[in-house]
Amino acid sequence: MIPVRAYLRLFTGYLRPYRAQAWLLALLLLVTIGLQLINPQLIAQFIDRALEGASVSSLVPIAVAFMVIAVCHQLIAVWATYLAEKIGWSATNQLRLDLTEHVLSLDMSFHKGTSPGELIERIDGDVTALSNFFSSMMIKVLGNAALLTGIIALLWVESWIVGLSITVFTVAAMLGMFRLHGVTVPWHKAIRATSAEMYGFIGEQIDGTEDIEANGATGYMIRRFDAIQRRWLPQVVRGWTGWALMWITSMTLYFFSLVIVYVLGSWLLGVGTLTVGSVYLVFQYVQMAHRPIEQIREELIDLQKAGASIARVEELFARETKLVQRADATLPEGPLGVDFHDVTFRYDDEAGDEIVLDDVSFTIAPGRVVGLLGRTGSGKSTVARLVTRLHEPQHGEVRVGEEATWDVNPADLRHRVAMVTQDVQLFRATVRDNLTFFDPTISDAEVLDALDRLELREWIESLPDGLDTHLDSGSGGLSAGQAQLLAFTRVFLRNPGVIVLDEASSRLDPATETLLERAVDHLLEDRTAIIIAHRLATVARADDIVILEDGSVLEAGARQQLADDPDSVFARLLATGLEEALA
Ligand code: ATP
Ligand code: MG
């Protein structure tokens, strides 16, 4: 079923900026149709006059007119094709942009649940399938319908017997073709679904090449690859068979239509109803009718495919972010407070999913540094994600700033809250671009100043090309500690009010460790910080300590007080050796 309303909404919405061009395109297509109908008339006249023995001088103008019209037709067709492509790409690019923006505004649960390959397929694949829809589909369907009507009308004018026969034949043929098409649709759908799965799979594998190789899972992965291919092949074969079936049927029908015209034409010529020119004309028109019939059929198939894409596009647009859009308060400069208020959170909304944070409350005063401790899986990284509002808690509130500024939007919040995670994502670009996040308004002087203040300048300058050193994507060919050094500078340049630091748990070499210690010292100056610490040196920097266990706060307080209290969990942790206990 074709969802007309969704079609129209997208169509009119995205075509509005190109209204003028679309009308011009419609006009051009109508003109080409008109020109196509005129030319056979000229030839018919030419034949009849030539048979009547008219002089050559009276035939020449007809021949010239024929050629002029033929050339004009081709030129206009080229122009129309150019316009159609241009409109199609402009409209779909806007749609790609809107989809990308929408997807970026979604919360992390969407992104975790969607593989990159699938996203590419949905934002680019589906939209590309729509480009014909935006440019010329409607016009072609209508235009070809007009052309077909014109041809049939002219056939009726020539001879009602031919007109009637061809009308009945055309209607029957088109109904038959649609019937057949209905049978092949599911075959094509299956191919598309498998292809999306295939690309999702490949994307994931390329992402995980290192782990797959290292764990000897190559054989398993190739078998999975093979399994998908095995499913894919028969589907593709069936799809092409469907296509061939359609083609053969269409050609056979075309052949029969010509037979009808030959039989009728020779009979009508024999009884003297039609002249030789008219028989030619009828023959030519029936031959011409084949194309619009084919095109209408193809466009309707495309329209149906577009229907599937539109449904998927609409579905993506309908995905609402779970992030609450609040009023637009702006956060003040300087350190910001953080307040967890009765926060309960699970990653999946489905009831029954494991609760990761259970009624967690704690407050961090502006400018304080909090060390967040807990065993692996206790929810530390989750706390970090909630502060940066990558997720929204199911119950309770995570507030940043002070009461007047609690209602900020996620996008604004992320300008003032920065996170350095355990695995820093670097981009295939220069160190400079990795530090500024491709922001050209940040000058080299600013970058160098930041590096100076973090005491990292010497280190950066020791890289092969300094700021111009090219990094690879992923970890960039740097160690985890070094990548964190870059991330610190990145964050420092943004001058956030809250920093969340998920410390790399891997052991660092002493040189990097010294650099890291000094950089963290400078980074935390005059800022609120939550540090998820794995090392004693980092914990020692904290003013306060929060210890998580099984999603609850086990202990919280000023670090010195807890350390001095022999009954505290923290004191016991220190005694048994923090690094071993938390590793
Ligand atoms: P570590 O010290 O190993 O980094 P952590 O304290 O940071 O551990 P979290 O990453 O916050 O632990 O994970 C807490 C719980 O939430 C774990 O049980 C984990 O399985 C679950 N979890 C983490 N991330 C997700 C996710 N994206 N989707 C579903 N569950 C998750
Ligand atoms: Mg973690």
Image (cartoon, grey):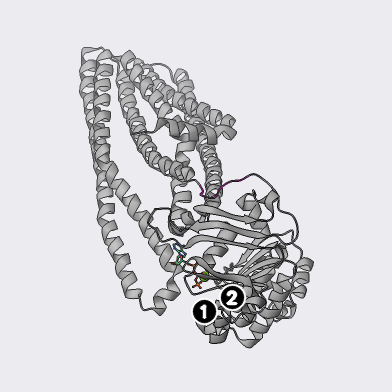
**In the rendered view, would you say 29 is above or below 581?**
above
Residues at marks 1 and 2, CA–CA distance in whole angstroms: 9 Å
Label 2, residues with CA under 10 Å away: few <14, some 14-19, many ≥20? many
Q: Is mark 1 within 8 Å of ligand 1?
A: yes
Q: Residues within 10 Å of mark 1 (few under 14, many from 20)?
A: some
395 shown above or below 210 = above
Residue 577, image x, y percentages: 55, 85
Provide the residue designation for mark 1.
Answer: 582
| 261 drawn magenta | no
Tags 1 and 2 in contact by the CB under 8 Å rule? yes
Q: 526 or 560, which lies in front?
A: 560
Q: Is residue 385 visible in this depiction of the protein?
A: yes
Residue 371 position within the rendered picture, expressed as x and y whole percent measured from the top left? 61, 72
**Nearer the observer, 461 or 241:** 461
Write down the quadrant of residue 153 in the picture.
Answer: top left
Q: Which residue is mark 2?
A: 533
Q: Is residue 322 magenta?
A: yes
What type is the residue that disc 2 sits on?
Ala
On the question of residue 478 being in view, the answer is no
Q: Position of residue 432 (x, y in %)?
A: 69, 68
Prevailing secondary structure class for the magenta stretch in the rendered image = loop
State which quadrant residue 402 falls in: bottom right
Asked whether 42 or 456 is in front, the reply is: 456
Local secondary structure at mark 2: loop
Amino acid marked by disc 1: Leu
Give the magenta range: 321-326
